Amino acid sequence: MRNTRRIPHVLVLLALGACVVGATQALHGSGWGPALRSVADRLLPNPTVLMYVHAPAAESYAETYTDATGAGANYVYHVVGADARGATRELQLIFFGAKADGTGLLEIEAKGGTGVRYHHVAEANVPTAALEALRTPGPE
């Protein structure tokens, strides 16, 4: 009996996910797609994974959009991150109100394909497997 009670919850989550994906696609051209992707990644039951990336160059942002207050711009970067085991994936980072500085390495709490929180980290504090993965050129 318990399994039948879970089915409606799963269906609601799937429907919610489909709505978020649809809204993200619809608003992508407006500049708000990255913000919706970020919200979806945070709401869906994705695990949080610690990842490392080279800080993106200031002018390498993929797009910008006006922040919610209308006072500034948010810059969206797509970077390749590596976890402690050396597994890599593309992440979306949103720099709120300023461009990235392009220096050093960042440690990121990633949820889905979005960097939720990030800060600069010394190379000595990055796992060896992550550093090796970041040094290896990926597929182009």
Image: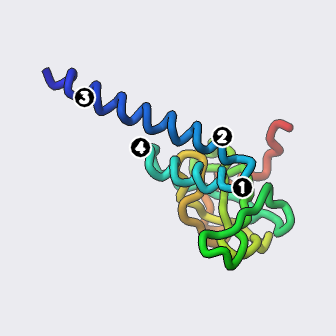
- Find numbered disc 3 in the image and state the secondary structure of the residue it sits on: helix
Name which residue lies at 86% across and 66% down: 59
In the image, 84 versus 26, the foreground residue is 26
Task: Classify residue 110 as left or right of residue 97.
Answer: left
Residue 16 in the image: state x and y as whole percent.
44, 38
Disc 1 target residue:
31
Instruction: Check disc 4 and report the residue beneath it.
Output: 45
Q: Residues within 10 Å of mark 3 (few under 14, many from 20)?
A: few
Left or right relative to 8: residue 91 = right
Give the numbered dot on residue 75. none
Note whether 81 is above or below 12 in the view shown: below
Sort mark 2 into few (<14), some (14-19) or many (20+) by Cα contacts within 10 Å.
some
Residue at position x 71%, y 76% from top?
Answer: 72
Q: Earlier in the sequence, mark 2 or mark 1?
A: 2
Give the mark nearest the N terminus, 3 or 2. 3
Q: Residues within 10 Å of mark 1 (few under 14, many from 20)?
A: some
Task: Give the labeled residue for mark 3.
Answer: 6
Measure the alpha-carbon separation of dots 4 and 1. Answer: 25 Å
Residue that badge 2 annotates: 25
Q: Is residue 116 above or below residue 81?
A: below
Label 3 or label 1, whichever comes before in sequence order: 3
The reply to whether the C-beta atoms of the residues labelled 3 and 1 are less than 8 Å apart is: no
Amino acid type, residue under disc 1 in the picture: Gly
Q: Quick check: 78 left or right of 5?
A: right
User: Which of these two is toward me, 128 or 52?
Assistant: 52
Q: Earlier in the sequence, mark 4 or mark 3?
A: 3
Nearer to us of marks 3 and 1 is 1
What's the distance in space between the residues labelled 2 and 4, CA to CA? 20 Å
Residue extending farthest to the bottom is: 71
- Of helix, strand and loop, which one carries label 1? loop
